[in-house]
Image (cartoon, rainbow, N blue to C red):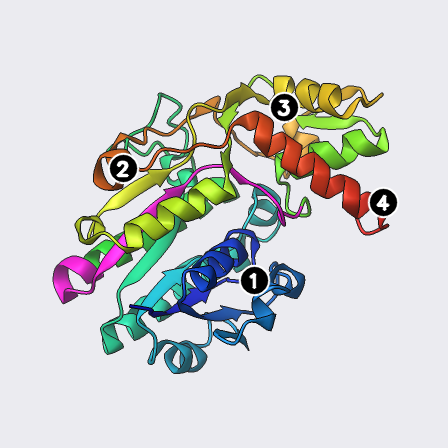
Amino acid sequence: MSRTFLITGGAGFIGSHLTDRLLAEGDEVVVLDNLSTGRLENLDDARRHPRFHFVHGSILDPLIVDEVLRDTDFVVHLAAAVGVKLIVEQPLRSLITNVRGTENVLDAAHRYRVPTLVASSSEIYGKNDAGPLAETADRIMGSPTVARWAYGSAKALDEILALTYNRERELQTIVVRLFNTVGPRQSPAYGMVIPRFVRQALRGDAITVFGTGTQVRCFGHVNDVVSAIIGLIHTEASVGEVFNIGNPANEITILDLAEEIIRRTGSSSTVKLIPYEEAYATGFEDMHRRIPDISKISTTIGWTPTESLEQILADAIEEASIEIAAGSG
């Protein structure tokens, strides 16, 4: 039976892919987005669909949230500040969006008894670079004067709100912690590393690696992430739980990632190391390794990511090549 989904932040990278998938499965989708970081172009296909509805508005407006949520069957709350660059440069905006916005969504969801999935972030683990990190791993946070850790604390508060609404007010909530997600429609504008590296390589510019480049990350394809979210939405056992979503198999240092992109694009680019204090505000801090343990979600819904790093890079290179050729990349 089809359902009506509200996706906050649905004009963004992940939200637009989720929108397309739900429409393809026969559901109705309402997207609420203020287009501060999302793009209408991401919804070009969806906007031609009779079961799609777009509302231009902010999760910080409780009246709009109430209006668009009351007649829906399920909420996927993706609207948030995105990217390390935005978080560092606009910490107050990030904090207010992530905390007050989530509170507005959960308050309205409770009012109308609408189940809700809240997207959190691997940033909540802070400096914990042991790994792979399970959902029960300790949070190791730096000083709240550092914008990055303030953001991680805000996302942790989002999780606490969602889980408390479940336990105390019996609202059906699910929390997902998203690790690095990559794929078509991801903008390089907010410091997203693969889209940025690919465009630098295709132009023959120096690939700017922040820090030493020895930091280790893993990258999941948006198609896998969307499959995981949909699987959790349709599984009763996921209610009241927290799940990592990422691809631990695609583990690589950032320096090796840059070199691999140079190789795959046939670029003449060189790698340029940029100290953190030049790339970001003074006092920026990072972690050496961030890899998820995905055994919980695999056990709960049988989900395993299938897209390799090779496919992720191929998709990124193809999309960026088209944009550059058209003069828009």
Whether 73 is drawn above or below 17: the answer is below
Q: In this view, does 136 lie to the left or right of 194?
A: left
Q: Earlier in the sequence, mark 1 or mark 2?
A: 1
In the image, is residue 145 above or below residue 248? below
Any part of residue 144 in sight: no
Write down the residue under mark 3: 211
- Foreground mark, 3 or 1, reads 1
Q: Earlier in the sequence, mark 3 or mark 1?
A: 1
Of the image marks 2 and 4, the number of the one nearer the N terminus: 2
Whether label 2 touches label 3, CB < 8 Å? no
Checking the image for residue 325, the label placed there is: 4
Q: Nearer the viewer, residue 323 or 180?
A: 323
Mark 2–mark 4 distance (CA, rounded to whole Å): 41 Å
Mark pair 3, 1: CA separation: 31 Å
In this orientation, does residue 302 appear?
Answer: yes
Amino acid type, mark 3: Gly
Dot 1 surroundings within 10 Å: few (below 14), some, or many (20 or more)?
many
Q: Earlier in the sequence, mark 1 or mark 4?
A: 1
CA gap, disc 2 to disc 3? 37 Å
- Between 11 and 233, the residue placed more toward the observer is 233
Q: What residue is pinned by disc 1?
A: 11
Mark 2 touching mark 4, by CB under 8 A? no
From which residue to which does the magenta span run? 165-187
Which is more N-terminal, label 4 or label 3? 3
